[in-house]
Image (tube, rainbow, N blue to C red):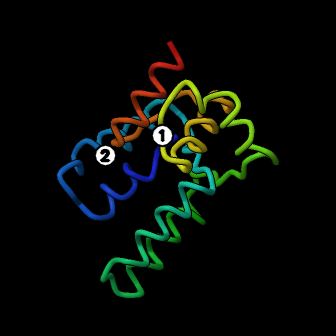
Amino acid sequence: MLDSSVWISLFSEDSQLEKALRILMLIPEKGMRIIVPIIVYLEVINWLNRQKFDNNKRDEIRNIFLHGKKIIITYPEKGLWYKAVENYGRKVKLKSLDLLILSFALDSQVAEFYSFDKKLYRAYQELTR
């Protein structure tokens, strides 16, 4: 599972670009698929809409998510927010969307979780030890 911070690094070509590319290259080598919770997809789309990309670039990025062969957009089970707060809210201090992403990653038992958000990644590491 890739957090929106990894996707945004890929598309914005920021200082984390090389690290994001290395992560993306590992996935086919390991034969994995990329799980994209709808929350992460929406965060990336919100970021995308604030950028000064032309429409072709925006469509290209959307199509990566919607038609990528190794990408699966998933929807949380009903009540994920309540479950996230109940199970993890007191254990970690995260923004609400990050808490949902963390809960999704933990409850889905993803094989790998990548995020450039240090707080989110640290919380994931602490709860999976």
**Residue 20, numbered circle:** 2
Between residues 83 and 106, which one lies in front from this camera angle?
83
Where residue 27 sits, quadrant-wise, is top left
Q: Mark 1 against mark 2, which lies toward the viewer?
A: 1
Q: Is residue 45 above or below residue 69?
A: below
Residue at 35% over, 87% down: 54
Query: In the image, 95: left or right of 21?
Result: right
x and y, in percent, of residue 8 in the image: 36, 58
Residue at 64% over, 54% down: 73
Q: Which residue is mark 1?
A: 94
Between residues 65 and 105, which one lies in front from this camera angle?
105
Q: Is residue 95 above or below residue 54?
A: above
Q: Which residue reaches farthest left? A: 15
Q: Amino acid at mark 1?
A: Leu
Query: In the image, 112: left or right of 104?
Result: left
Residue at 68% over, 51% down: 74
x and y, in percent, of residue 12 in the image: 28, 64
Label 2: which secondary element: helix
x and y, in percent, of residue 1 in the image: 52, 40
Where residue 107 sits, quadrant-wise, is top right
x and y, in percent, of residue 124 in the image: 48, 27
Rate crowding at label 2 as few (under 14), some (14 to 19) or many (20 or more) other CA atoms within 10 Å: many
Of pointers 1 and 2, the one earlier in the residue sequence: 2
Spatial CA distance of label 1 from label 2 is 23 Å
Q: Is residue 6 visible?
A: yes
- Count the numbered circles shown: 2
Query: In the image, 4: left or right of 35?
Result: left
